[in-house]
Amino acid sequence: MADPDLDIAANRSARRYEPMDLIRRVLWGVGAVLFRWTPRLLYGLRNALLRLFGAEVGRNVRIHPRATIYFPWNLSIGDWSSVGEDALIYNLGSIAIGEQVTISQRAHLCAGTHDATDPAMPLKKPPIAVGDQAWVCADAFVGPDVTVGEGAVVGARAVAVGDVDAWTIVGGNPARKIKRRTLDADHSP
């Protein structure tokens, strides 16, 4: 039985986006089809398409054509970073991905949620930041308003709902520190 205090009608009737955002969403619907249809090795073409829709895309970025990017205008991604196959960049709020970052296959960065303390459950769009040289591993989830620090690793299938310290490896659900990430002498932080 539904909680009588929830106001689903108010939630569904709430204005979540400005008119210009709605227009951009419709246009990106076409752009996203083109994005997905590009051959895998045409990274530059996909990057140009993302830039056309307002994304800030660095040099030598590789985004798989089967990655899903909801709103390019809310994405910035630094040089030499990559986004893998079937990764989900749910960027209702801004998502900033640093340089030399790997977002592995089927990872989910979720910059959107609802305010569960409000009976109308309004949409919230908190940001996500992923620092330089970080790695969000396969099937990992990074939640709204989370910062993944420089050099950090969010392990496979981990659920990061709180900030991840720099040069730390986390895993599990919810993600907990496993150990400090160290690189060999030729690649030290």
Image (cartoon, helix red, strand yellow):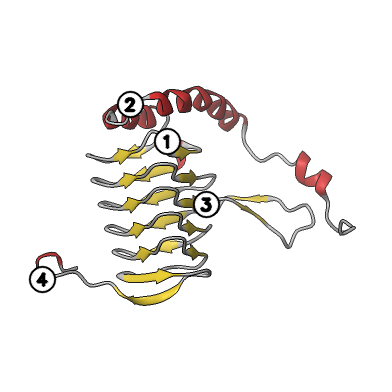
The amino acid beneath tag 4 is Ala
Q: Is residue 118 above or below residue 79?
A: below
The amino acid beneath tag 2 is Pro
Q: Is residue 143 above or below residue 20?
A: below
At mark 2, the secondary structure is loop
Asked if the residue at tag 3 contacts the one at tag 2, i.e. Cβ–Cβ closer than 8 Å, the answer is no
Q: CA distance from mark 4 to mark 2?
A: 38 Å
Q: Residue at x 62, y 29 (%)?
A: 19
At mark 3, the secondary structure is strand
Q: CA distance from mark 2 to mark 3?
A: 26 Å
What residue would you read off at disc 4?
A: 185
Q: Which mark is residue 110?
A: 3
What residue would you read off at disc 1?
A: 66
Q: Position of residue 61 (x, y in %)?
A: 27, 40
Q: Position of residue 60 (x, y in %)?
A: 22, 39
Q: CA distance from mark 4 to mark 1?
A: 36 Å
At mark 1, the secondary structure is loop
What residue would you read off at disc 2?
A: 39
Q: CA distance from mark 2 to mark 1?
A: 10 Å
Q: Is residue 45 left or right of residue 163?
A: left
Q: CA distance from mark 3 to mark 4?
A: 35 Å
- Image quadrant in which the N terminus is located: bottom right
